Image (cartoon, rainbow, N blue to C red):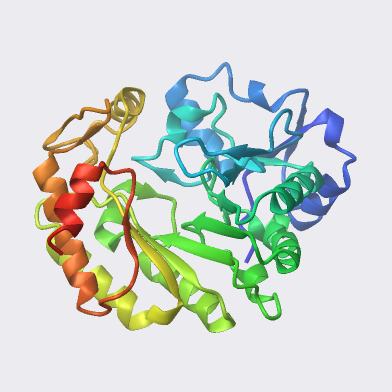
Amino acid sequence: MIQIPDKIYIEEAIQDHPYTKKILSKIDSIPITYIDDYKKIGQLKPFDQRASEDKNSLALASKKGELVKSIGRMDHGQFYLFHEIDCKYDCEYCYLQYYFQTKVPVIFVNRDEVLENIEKLLNGFDKPYFHVGEVCDALAFDDITEFSIDIARLFKKYPNGTIEFRTKSTSVQNLLSIDDPPDNVIPSWTFSPQNIIDMIEHKTPSFKERLSAAKRCQETGYTVGVRLDPIIRVPGWEEPYKEMINEIFTTLDCRQIDYISLGTPKHNKVLLETIKKRFPDSPTILGEIFPSTDGKYKYLKFHRVHIYKSMISWIREFDSDIRVDLSIESDEVKELVFGSC
């Protein structure tokens, strides 16, 4: 079922664009405001008001500048898409809270340019990897954009590339509609125990809903990614996280899990101040969180190592060979975790 936004903003220059018309045909009968520049939306509102109100809206615009960007922190040949920005969900730990000037999720209608840029890179690199979900939720609006269908069609032609859709959404109808889904299209879900979702992952689908979406994708033929990040160290955290891992591995087929990624909170100073302002009682900033050598605010190293080793030990009870990665961690921490696992 398509989730209808409360309001839609449309840049005047693209009101007659075919993609604009396609999206409007799926979400008609809602208020429309025409604007000259999506970046001006909500600029007169206080930050807190924008952050809480405007996420329920949607903007259609044309993207100027790069649509596909290289990821500098990763190996050469890694890219992320700027086909959409921001997110309709409101997770307390998310850096998108401060990353963009406007808080309205934006869909860029010049999708043909996105696909053309991707195809050039597929032709120019041996094994390019594309991340969808760095600056948005990858599938949150797929029910109205049908972007995954265009992507699957393209990547069937280029088996040398891989594209990953990172999401908390359950909008998988289009993925499920694709006959013989390509191996190089990987939907991946961020999972948290339901008590954590209730506390800090506002407006998101439940754990069971996400797990069901992942299971349906596996049954259709997809290999999926499992992202357990950030792991929140609240009192008694072990029991709900262990139970979550149990549910994941008794529901999903391990043979169709591409990887598992583990991470803990890592806030830069701007994000930390944003969370303090919007969610002063957030468990993501309460407790033992300190500035690290890289400038990020994190749990103490020995706490992070304990969390990772605990999670890996529970995972290994189900599968001794499945790939487990640590998200943005130092070589020292990786050695402490994997050196004795």
Which of these two is toward me, 282 or 246?
A: 246
Residue 47: where, in percent of width, then height? Answer: 46, 22
On the rendered structure, is 20 left or right of 256?
right
Residue 264: where, in percent of width, then height? Answer: 26, 47
On the rendered structure, is 148 left or right of 287?
right
Name the residue at 30% across, 75% down. 321
Q: Quadrant of residue 143?
A: bottom right
Residue 125: where, in percent of width, then height? Answer: 66, 50
Which of these two is toward me, 337 or 210?
A: 337
**How many numbered circles does the render carry?**
0
Which of these two is toward me, 317 or 341?
A: 341
On the rendered structure, is 7 left or right of 73?
right
Q: Which quarter of the image is occupied by the C terminus?
A: bottom left
Which of these two is toward me, 191 or 309?
A: 309
Up-down relation of residue 173 to residue 306 (above or below): below
Q: Which quarter of the image is occupied by the N terminus?
A: bottom right
Can residue 29 be seen here? no
The furthest residue to the front: 126
Up-down relation of residue 70 to residue 273 (above or below): below
Name the residue at 30% across, 23% down. 269
Name the residue at 58% across, 44% down. 80
Can residue 281 be seen here? yes
The furthest residue to the top: 44
On the rendered structure, is 108 left or right of 307?
right
Up-down relation of residue 41 to residue 328 (above or below): above
Residue 78: where, in percent of width, then height? Answer: 55, 46
